[in-house]
Image (cartoon, rainbow, N blue to C red):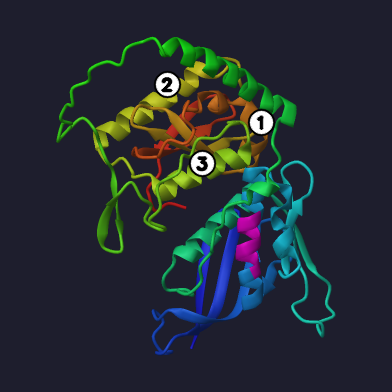
Amino acid sequence: MTVQRQYILPNCTLLVEGLAGADGSDPAAPLTVVLHAECQFPGIVMPLKGGREFLDGLVQAVSDYAQSILSGVPNLLASREAGSIVTLEPNGPNRHSVTVRPTTDEDKGEPQTAVLTTVQFFDLMEAIDQLLADTQTLPELSLPLQPIPRRNVKPPESVAQRAAPVVVGASTLVVAAAALFFIPIPDLKPTRAPQGNNSQRQEQVELDGESVPGTTAQSGEPLESAAIADPTDPIAAAAALSQLEVAAPAITDEDTLAALQSDLVDRVESELDSDATFDDRLIYRVAVSETGEVLGYKYENEPALTQVEATPLPSLMYLPVDGDRPLDEPVAQFRLTFEPDGSVTAERVDDDAP
């Protein structure tokens, strides 16, 4: 029995068609054999399509391309491009080219190509995330993530610039050591550490049926910070929000949500130019902390991507001093809309909303 799974986003639809497992008559049985996979995008007539090899290549290529953009290492894909039938590369500002070459030497067809906007690429990433999280479709499909080799990362400063602080620091250390030599060693008494502190909050998530403090549900590894260096970078800001969606717990208290919703509108309106008008409606998904700080935002339509600098969102992004601190605080998500007349509205976004 043929089974179809669809992952529908506003700017991308991913369809996977195949055969169920042992009980082929049960439509709820996990899909284990891929017969056909297809990606459709608004405004693009010909969809990208293929079989299992196409689907595996698409998942890996999208992941590698996103990591390449976020890390700033353009050669991240070089080791995989030769063996993959799907490749992704930049094609001008806010444009991304996808190429799918024929799967066999006997297939003489032309390569499939499509130029995606950044919004379409974001939705393609989210559709693939939903596919990987769906236990009823290809349960064995996984995406092994590896850190970028240090040798591929170019230092932002020359050797001389990086060595100068070391030389200065070494001389300062010698002077400080000579001065401290004459200071007597203080008599310290051991103290007992407090056993409990209710003011310190520790979030827990479920991992294989057990509660593990400070870890993600997918990997069991410590949560990484979602902070970004440049809040005006559209891909980095959206990636920060996507990481919050996966890792950070959600705020559920109704009074807190109502207060955060009102505070978000007030803060945005106070920072927005009083004479601001837009040609089109701008729609963003925004994640805020319990204290009302904007931790990430994502574009939900094309005008929102191209006119982000006309909004106060980049200036409202919270950039902590310690960029490596764990992400351990609940967040709330809102859909923020800038109307053409300059008015601002916000509505809650459910946890399971696309």
Residue 158 in view in this figure: no
Is 189 displayed left or right of 315 in the figure? Answer: left
Above or below, comparing residue 115 to residue 234 in the picture: below
- Give amino acid for label 2: Asp
- Measured in 3D between alpha carbons, the distance from the residue under mark 1 to the one under mark 2, in whole angstroms, is 22 Å
Above or below, comparing residue 240 to residue 40 in the picture: above
Task: Give the camera-side residue of 282 and 117.
Answer: 117
Q: Which residues are magenta?
A: 57-64
Q: Position of residue 236 (x, y in %)?
A: 59, 40
Residue drawn at x 25%, y 59% is 210
- Give amino acid for label 3: Ala
Q: Are marks 1 and 2 in contact (CB under 8 Å)?
A: no
Dot 2: few (<14), some (14–19), or many (≥20) neighbours within 10 Å? some
Q: Position of residue 335 (x, y in %)?
A: 46, 39
Residue 266 is marked as 2
Dot 1: few (<14), some (14–19), or many (≥20) neighbours within 10 Å? few
Above or below, comparing residue 313 to residue 111 in the picture: above
